[in-house]
């Protein structure tokens, strides 16, 4: 029983990261209808940024979160403005797809060139602190990270729901032409959206650093899981993405506990394929 | 009759130029003796073939798969296991591997064709990764340590050589063969159906093209070619492991097509001839100082091509002054009206 509870908590804590990644991917996909295949690499960049801030400037990883988020927002905006917006005009899905794939290659191999392939990690004074809660043990950094995740999720939800810019972003995601007609600067919204999505991935990376090793391909598995979250949680839905992320984290730990850790990836992928196919078939039938 | 003669001259010139290019490729091994250079050529041949397989599905049909490394790996595994477990002849194993990959791809993707655009890409990634996970977790497939083919003396029957020259010729033959098949498909009814599906699937269905049927055909053919490449790879390297199927390899197999021009059958070959020697040169000379520099350059070239020449290098060439010059001065290409007139005349002659 205690094993089960422990697995639940671990799945929950990991699922929070998938949620955060998924939310970033979700707004990008929702607004521009492109899949950001370098989302995982953005998380990796966030991790390296935190690592640099901690090692060279001595900034605590949690204090670095806002700095990383702002830096990643700028990076995302620049990429959107210089690369993605011009290619959106060509209407070629293949090109847009491989643009983001190419960016992913650029970032992960750029990290390899700059930092080498060594595994790095950040160990602060409190990273080995554990909290006992009944039968369950939790590492303090994981708990703090999860708390920050919840705050970011609520903030994002409120931002999209109640602020003017949030409403504009949602308008563009529903109908770009209509949004342009009523006077919304669609290109500006694209830049904001991509910047925001990338900033969310970077935040997830910064929060991960204390209990995850940092290496150039660290983001790959997170990147694909973010896509799963988008598909399972439903387009444009922040609560849906949050729940889907938690579900994914739980599915992983549960399949590792009840079946075998080496099969957990396979089970995640198979579940994803089945959910996707069934869902799209239902949608097609309804039409 | 003057126009007919002009067209005849043009076709003759075209044949001569293509023949000369082919002759250069045939003569390369007699001049170049360095195994390192020959290895790069073999790499170009099989990567271009894999990229052509992708191009049938991605460029022609508009279904962007990112799981072609998995088909290739599956083909390689099917061949190797048949050879190792039953001692079958590798050439029979090649056919077996192609059939297995074609069947698996056809069965798995049948329910997936309801998915469009990015969803198809996601399923192809998930599917490729699933195959890899099955192989890593199964004793039958040799888990993560992979499978090796037996070594021995040179023999055509076992497709096993110490020199790289036979692999060079067979690789070249494979590339040209697959190219001819792709060209045939491109010009056939199937090719037009696939391109219609790419542009607008609903419109294609409305004019009587069955999208599911054609997409299944495209997937099966594409996967079978990838399986063939897997067979070639396994016979050439003589050792395979699940690393062959990682996501990055699928991406690598697409790059020649996108850089060369995904709308053209020749695109993957052009892209492969440019990108792979560049990548290998960087890998050989800089990887000890700067690991990852070759893939970094790959990414830079890819981004530059997509950003500035969205139709690829071949698309750029097709509208360039160089092509105009070559067409007019070297090939003596007659104007389009003349070409069409002669084609119509020959068509009418056949009708009568």
Image: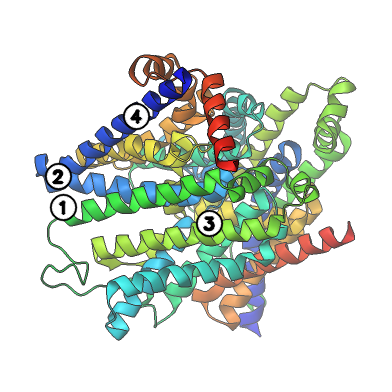
Mark 4, secondary structure of its residue = helix
Residue toward you, B25 or B333 = B333
Mark 3, secondary structure of its residue = helix
Disc 3 to disc 4: CB gap under 8 Å: no
- Mark 2 to mark 1 CA distance (whole Å): 6 Å
The nearer-to-camera label among 1 and 3 is 1
Q: Which residue is mark 2?
A: B29
**In this view, A88 is above or below B154:** above
Q: Chain of mark 3?
A: A
- Are the residues flagged by discs 3 and 4 from a single subunit? no
Q: Which mark is residue B165?
A: 1
Disc 2 to disc 1: CB gap under 8 Å: yes
Quarter of the image containing the C terminus of chain B?
top right
- Mark 4 to mark 1 CA distance (whole Å): 31 Å
Q: Residues within 10 Å of mark 2 (few under 14, many from 20)?
A: some
Residue toward you, A20 or B23 = B23
**In this view, B317 is above or below A96:** above
Residue sitting at x 27%, y 83%: B87
Residue sitting at x 58%, y 40%: A94
The nearer-to-camera label among 3 and 4 is 4
Residue sitting at x 35%, y 37%: B275
């Amino acid at each position: 029983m205690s094993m089960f509870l422990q697995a639940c908590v671990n799945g929950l804590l990991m699922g929070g990261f998938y949620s955060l990644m998924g939310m970033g991917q979700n707004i990008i996909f929702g607004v521009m209808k492109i899949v950001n295949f370098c989302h995982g690499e953005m998380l990796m960049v966030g991790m390296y940024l935190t690592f640099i801030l901690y090692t060279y400037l001595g900034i605590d990883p949690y204090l670095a979160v806002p700095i990383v988020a702002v830096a990643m927002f700028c990076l995302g905006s620049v990429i959107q403005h210089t690369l993605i917006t011009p290619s959106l005009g060509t209407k070629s899905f293949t090109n847009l797809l491989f643009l983001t794939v190419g960016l992913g290659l650029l970032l992960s191999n750029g990290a390899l060139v700059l930092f080498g392939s060594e595994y790095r990690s950040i160990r602060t004074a409190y990273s080995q602190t554990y909290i006992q809660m009944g039968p369950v043990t939790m590492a303090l950094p994981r708990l703090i990270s999860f708390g920050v995740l919840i705050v970011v999720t609520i903030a994002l939800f409120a931002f999209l729901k109640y602020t003017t810019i949030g409403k504009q972003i949602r308008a563009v995601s529903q109908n770009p032409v209509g949004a342009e007609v009523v006077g919304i600067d669609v290109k500006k919204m694209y830049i904001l959206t991509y910047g925001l999505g990338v900033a969310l991935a970077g935040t997830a990376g910064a929060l991960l650093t204390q209990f995850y090793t940092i290496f150039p391909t660290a983001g790959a598995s997170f990147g694909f899981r973010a896509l799963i979250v988008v598909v399972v949680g439903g387009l444009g839905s922040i609560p849906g993405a949050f729940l889907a992320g938690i579900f994914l984290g739980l599915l992983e730990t549960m399949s590792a506990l009840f079946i075998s850790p080496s099969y957990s990836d396979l089970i995640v992928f198979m579940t994803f394929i089945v959910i996707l196919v069934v869902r799209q078939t239902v949608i097609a039938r309804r039409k | 009759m003057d126009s007919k003669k002009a067209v005849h001259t043009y076709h003759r010139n075209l044949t001569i130029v293509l023949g000369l290019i082919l002759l250069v490729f045939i003569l390369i091994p007699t001049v170049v003796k360095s195994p390192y250079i020959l290895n790069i050529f073999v790499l170009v041949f099989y990567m271009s073939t894999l990229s052509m397989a992708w191009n049938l599905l991605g460029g022609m049909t508009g279904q962007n798969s990112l799981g072609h490394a998995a088909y290739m790996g599956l083909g390689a595994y099917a061949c190797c296991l048949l050879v190792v477990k039953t001692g079958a002849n590798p050439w029979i194993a090649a056919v077996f591997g192609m059939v297995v990959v074609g069947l698996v791809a056809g069965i798995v993707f049948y329910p997936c064709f309801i998915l469009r655009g990015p969803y198809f890409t996601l399923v192809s990634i998930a599917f490729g990764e699933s195959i890899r996970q099955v192989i890593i977790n199964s004793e039958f497939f040799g888990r993560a340590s992979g499978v090796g083919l037996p070594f021995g003396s040179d023999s055509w029957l076992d497709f096993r050589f110490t020199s790289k020259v036979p692999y060079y010729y067979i690789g070249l033959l494979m590339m040209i063969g697959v190219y001819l098949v792709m060209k045939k498909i491109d010009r056939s009814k199937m090719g037009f159906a696939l391109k219609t599906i790419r542009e607008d699937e609903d419109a294609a269905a409305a004019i009587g093209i069955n999208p599911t049927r054609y997409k299944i055909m495209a997937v099966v053919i594409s996967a079978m070619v990838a399986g063939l490449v897997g067979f070639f790879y396994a016979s050439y390297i003589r050792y395979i492991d699940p690393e062959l199927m990682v996501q990055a390899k699928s991406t690598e197999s697409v790059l020649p097509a996108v850089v060369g021009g995904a709308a053209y059958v020749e695109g993957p070959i052009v892209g492969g001839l440019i990108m792979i020697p560049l990548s290998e040169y960087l890998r050989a000379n800089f990887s000890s100082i700067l690991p990852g520099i070759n893939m970094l350059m790959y990414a830079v070239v890819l981004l530059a091509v997509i950003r500035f020449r969205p139709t690829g290098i071949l698309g750029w060439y097709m509208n360039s002054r160089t092509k105009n010059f070559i067409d007019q001065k070297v090939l003596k290409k007659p104007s389009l009206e003349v070409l069409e007139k002669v084609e119509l005349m020959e068509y009418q002659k056949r009708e009568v």
